[in-house]
Amino acid sequence: MRAAVLEEAGRPIAVRDDVEIASPRPGQVRVRVTHCGVCHSDLSIADGVFPSPTPVVLGHEAAGVVEEVGADVSGLAPGDPVVLTPLPPCGVCPWCVRGEPGVCVNAGAILSNTFADGTTGLSRGGATVYRGVGLGGFAEQVLVPATGAIRIPADVPLEVACVIGCAVQTGVGAVLNTARVAPGDTVLVFGAGGVGLSIVQGARVAGAARILVADPVEERREAARRFGATDVIDPSREDAAARAQEVTGIGVDFAFDAVGRGSIVADGLRATRNGGTTVAVGAAPLDDVITIAPAALFTVTEKKLVGCTLGGCNSVREIPRLLSLWKAGRLDLEGLVTRRRPLEEINEAFDDLRASRGIRTVLAIGL
């Protein structure tokens, strides 16, 4: 099959036509990918910010059509349209049974780029090819656990639905599942890319009274207003945390880092009120750090700092729920997709992301 293969971090990605994919084992399905969004986590691996074994097929925000199902798979059949998730819940590990699917044992695949047993189902010339960020969606086909392919109605455009796989699950989930924003709360979002704007939409769905968004790119600040922001901030010109304190009088109830940077998490802690919560959503470089004075920020103020993986979503439940909100007109998925490219233009798509052009570039793959 054709697949975009990263041979070495920092080098251009090459589209190969000799990548082999295995047949599904029990509990797995093979899906023909039609569309895949380009996420910053993919770029971080491509640029060497996140270490990864190579060669690797990146891409983890995908949708497609089931082609083959393995033994013991029920509820899916060839021809079913599906949205794929990089974190398929196992449903039985200690974290799943506690209602914490974001830290399911399957989350390890996001870092290992393999299945739990160390296999990938991908190869070239007999050598292993890794499945990037737990999926490997920049390819004509993917192999996933059955819970990693969530069936959707046939009338949902796959080029729109694919962004639910990462950006929308992560952003809306961070608001509804991790933070549990309530009607009337105040929110500050750092970063207005695909995840940040999904946080904005989640805050709007939750009924937040004031939604502040900080981003240095004017185009993205304008987009934030369209998605529901009440106030926008250019952090290159003013201190976003100080502005949040000024607007609310006491600080925001919730701050979200959708960039992935320790200094921004610290800004979020400054921006929140006593008792408020900062949610670290973005994937920061592994060597980044957060400097916190515990006595000043926690002992007296009861401020909270929490992590968030894929919005704490159980994708089997969350993807249908998000599609229902889209069909009801409460989520804008189409507006997140600002550029479409063929798979052969994957390097140009990464350039879009590096330059903060648009919001989400979606690659058309196996149409």
Image (cartoon, helix red, strand yellow):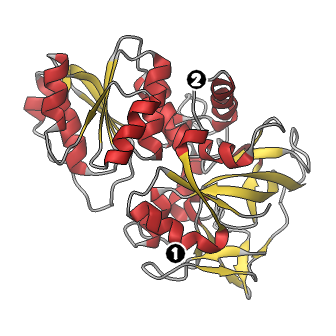
Q: Residues within 10 Å of mark 1 (few under 14, many from 20)?
A: some
The residue wearing badge 2 is 330
Question: Which quarter of the figure has residue 126?
Answer: bottom right
Depth check: give the residue in front, 291 or 191. Answer: 191
Going 29% across and 44% down the picture, which residue do you hit? 215
Element under label 1?
loop
- Find residue 336 and report its horizontal and vertical position in percent: 54, 43
Going 52% across and 73% down the picture, which residue do you hit? 347
The residue wearing badge 1 is 53
Q: Amino acid at mark 1?
A: Pro
Left or right, 27 with respect to 301, comes to right
Going 33% across and 50% down the picture, which residue do you hit? 260
Is residue 365 visible from the viewing direction of this image? yes
Is 236 above or below relative to 274?
below
Is 49 above or below relative to 311?
below
Going 37% across and 47% down the picture, which residue do you hit? 219
Left or right, 92 with respect to 232, comes to right
Q: Residues within 10 Å of mark 2 (few under 14, many from 20)?
A: some
Element under label 2?
loop
